[in-house]
Amino acid sequence: MARILVIDDEPQIRRFLRIALEAEGHAVTEASTAREGAGRAATSAPDAVILDLGLPDRDGTEVLREIRGWSEVPVLVLSVRAEEDQKVAALDLGAQDYVTKPFGTRELLARLRALLRNKTAETETAARIEIGDLLLDAAQHSVRLGGQPLSLTPKEFDLLWLLASHAGRLVTQRMALQRVWGPAHAEDSQYLRVFIRQLRAKLGDSAADPVWIFTEPGIGYRFRES
């Protein structure tokens, strides 16, 4: 089962997609506006996003650009815009695939399966992250800085892995809390502040003059680029 976020302003399209996706065993979250869609992309941790471009409050390409600022979640654009330059623009912004309306259900589901397979393959190969002299090993659940091991708790490791795997991109507070502590803790920002402070201490980092973890006030954190 995968978590699929559908961002489309047409209720009948959302309803049709929900039926088709749930029949495949997926869990579906819906959004009808750009604002709602961007928010749900940040908070619901979807495995893939199906995105319409003709949204009522903002163009869907702006949502895509916003998502790509902090996430590599696979995005399949579903739009009536069939012009080649529109497709190229969306793909250049980071969409993995583009399907035009009207569409065939079997084709859409097949393309979605391909995106999810690729995402799984990428996740499985990303067992190590190396940024500067910092090395994280997922298999061993270990961290080395300058060749020296760091002693981290499981939660500290999970948070550091999340930040480092999104190096250079914004990780919102809600995203970090939901990914590391679970959906029930999406508002418990005090947890996050405490663990960020602990991570900084162990990395020899400073909030006033950061090298590794940079604060985006009121929004979240951004890890040093690789």
Image: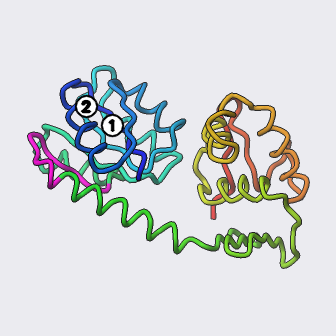
- Residue 6's disc is 1
Q: Is residue 92 left or right of residue 157?
A: left
Say which amino acid is labelled 1: Val
Closer to the camera, 31 or 89?
Answer: 31
Outermost residue, bottom direction? Answer: 147
| Residue 212 drawn at (x, y percent) | 76, 55
The magenta stretch is: 96-107
Q: Is residue 163 left or right of residue 28?
A: right
* Residue at figure coordinates x 89%, y 65% from the top left: 151
Q: Is residue 76 positioned above or below 141 on the image?
A: above
**Quadrant of res 126:** bottom right
Residue 3 covered by magenta stretch:
no
* Residue at figure coordinates x 8%, y 40% from the top left: 102
Determine the secondary structure under disc 1: strand
For the residues bearing labels 2 and 1, Cβ distance under 8 angstroms? yes
Whole-angstrom CA distance, mark 2 to mark 1, is 7 Å
Q: Is residue 190 positioned above or below 175 on the image?
A: above
Q: Earlier in the sequence, mark 2 or mark 1?
A: 1
| Residue 124 drawn at (x, y percent) | 52, 71
Determine the secondary structure under disc 2: helix
